[in-house]
Amino acid sequence: MWSYAIVKHALKAWAAYTMATEAMMSIRTPARRGCILNYHRVSQLGTWDFTIDSWNVTPQRFFHQVRLLAEEADCISLDKMLRLVQSGPHVKPAVTLAFDDGFANIQHNVLPIIKQHGIPVTVFVVTKYIGSRNPFPFDGWGFRNWKRAPVSNWRPISWMELEDCVESGLVSVGSHSHSHLHGSDCSDEQLEEEAAVSRELLKKYLGSGHGEFYAYPYGLTRHGDVPSAYIQALRRTGYRAAVTTDLGLVSPASNILALPRIEATGQDLPLSLLAKASGLLGPTRLLDQLRRSRRNGISPQLNT
């Protein structure tokens, strides 16, 4: 019997080709919408495990995605995105690239490519694990493959590597919480702590320009990952905006503390990613119905 993850891989590939075809036939129309693309890992894995989703895009695929977006879209910072969607219609798709979790390969594989194209990105980090020598405890692929995969494929980023990214002038760093807990499992006090501690650490180590934006762990509103108490905790702790994993484009009507995003996958051809950014989301909506609120994974004992 095919596993859920294998079926999901196949559907992502089908969706990518379908949307690439749609993109070639589509006609742009002015819109007051923006797309926040949601990435995780950018790495040459070398270890294939189709029974679990790696959330990975190879550096080669990422390069080609970015090159087309740089030509055909307005690739802008999250801060500028929020201002642009309020300013009036624009013809080119407005796109912000965002990375969850905070893998070391952000510095190694993402930074050189965005430097080459001059594209800003936002990296949402889980502050408790910055500098850890173990996989993230919520990274199912990393836990399953950490002994046989290169360390750079699963290692969390360090503070020094984050500083190098920030010094490029292209990377802003937001919070992905302190411990990556499920919002539905937390008390109001825990939600406040997750938001406040991570923001304080980012400002302490990286400066006042960081820790302004938040990405909810798991982030699916309909599965209870973003309860109203979580939104209120972010408001009290001073975040300017926050992103979910709810599928959609950002518009003037979007909740500033619960913005939708669109997943960028390793199966996405450059044209299919451009189609997503343009709002052609039919196949992606089908995939969205299959999503789970929790990642698949196992947690073997690791040496610290």
Image (tube, grey):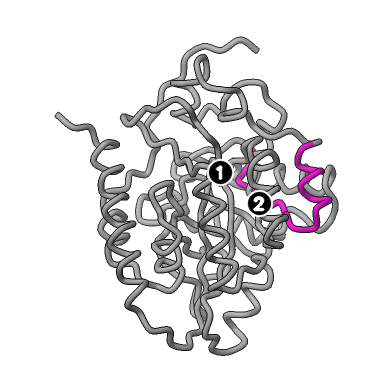
Most foreground residue, 298 or 222: 298
Cβ–Cβ below 8 Å for labels 2 and 1? yes
| Figure quadrant of the C terminus | top right
The verdict on residue 172 being magenta is: yes
Q: What stretch is highlighted in magenta?
A: 161-178
Residue located at (85% from left, 51% from top): 207
Q: Which of disc 1 and disc 2 is earlier in sequence?
A: 1
Amino acid carrying label 2: it is: Ile
Residue found at the very far left of the displayed protein: 1
Quarter of the image where one finds residue 7: top left
Which mark is on residue 113?
Answer: 2
Please, what secondary structure does the residue beneath circle 1 have?
helix
**Separation (CA) of disc 2 from disc 1:** 8 Å
Q: Residues within 10 Å of mark 2 (few under 14, many from 20)?
A: some
User: Mark 1 = which residue?
Assistant: 59
Q: Position of residue 181 (x, y in %)?
A: 52, 38
Q: Where is residue 179 in the image (x, y as percent from the top left)?
A: 60, 35
Question: Residue visible at 40% across and 50% down?
Answer: 224
Is 267 drawn above or below residue 117 in the view shown?
above
Measuring from the top left, give residue 1's x and y in whole percent: 14, 29
- Identify the residue at horizontal 42%, vertical 64% (top origin): 271
293 relative to 103 in the view: left or right: left
Q: How crowded is mark 1: few (under 14 residues within 10 Å), some or many (20 or more)?
A: many
